[in-house]
Each structure stands twice: as structure tokens, then as C-alpha cells.
Image (cartoon, rainbow, N blue to C red):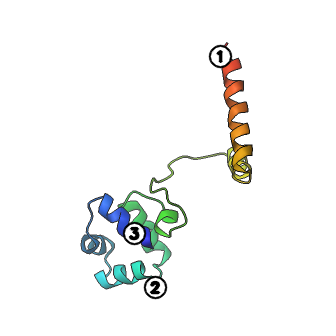
Amino acid sequence: MNNLKKIAKIKNKSLTSLSLDLEISPEAISQYISGKIKPKADILINMAKILETSTDYLLDLTDNPNSPNIDLDEKENTLINNFRKLSNNEKSQVNAYIQAFLDLKNI
């Protein structure tokens, strides 16, 4: 949970005040950061809410600290997951195609 320390600093939240908000000990926060223990799911979810970030960010699964507040339908999720499987070159081609499509649509 290396990102925990980063996001707390960005949000001007001390680890002590975070521990008070979560009703856990400051030692527990230190152990999360050091990787000695993992927080329970409810603690992790509350931590993400307090710090306005995602659980994925707190678990170091993403470098994006912004909380995804977008509800996607099944087709949109499938599209994004398929896009992520492409190479960078293929992603550029898809982006160019979409931009061309949008340009034609606006004529």
C-alpha cells in the first residue's frame, strides 16, 4: 500500500487523523504501508471514501489516484477491456478511427 502514504499527503490528511477516522490504531496504518498486514475490506473501502480515491489505488493496482465515478454498461465495459488488450500501435489506430468517425458525424 505504497500509494496510501502518497494520497494521504495529497489530501493533506495525516496518517494519525486517518486512523482516528477509521477507528483503528496508527500502528495498523503503519503496518498497511509496510505491507506487514492487509486491511479488511470494510476498512479499505472506508479508507478509499475518506481519501476520495479507489481501492485499486490504495492496493497499488493502479497509478491513477482519481476515483472512478463512472457507471459503465456491459457494452462499455467490454469495449474498454478489449481496448486494453491491444498494443499501443493498435490503440492509436482505434483512436484515429474513432476521431475520423466523429469528424464525419459532425459534417
Label count reads 3
Which numbered disc, 2 or 1, marks the residue that appears first in the sequence? 2
- The residue drawn where x is 72% and y is 38% is 94
Callout 3 secondary element: helix
Q: Residue 27 lies in what quarter of the image? A: bottom left
Say which residue label 1 marks: 106
Residue 88 x %, y %: 69, 48
Farthest residue in the top direction?
Answer: 107
Asked whether disc 3 touches disc 2, contact meaning CB atoms under 8 Å apart, the reply is no
Say which residue label 2 marks: 37
Residue 62 x %, y %: 53, 61
The amino acid type, in three-letter code, at marker 3 is Leu
Residue 76 lies, with reference to residue 47, above or below; the image says above
Residue sitting nearer the eye, 79 or 2: 2
Q: Measure the C-alpha gap from mark 3 to mark 2.
A: 14 Å
The amino acid type, in three-letter code, at marker 1 is Asn
Q: Measure the C-alpha gap from mark 2 to mark 1.
A: 54 Å
- The residue drawn where x is 47% and y is 78% is 40
Q: Is residue 100 left or right of residue 58?
A: right
Residue 96 x %, y %: 69, 32
Q: In this view, does 45 lie to the left or right of 15?
A: right
Indicate the quadrant containing the N terminus: top left, top right, bottom left or bottom right. Answer: bottom left
Q: Could you say which disc has been placed on residue 4 in the image? A: 3
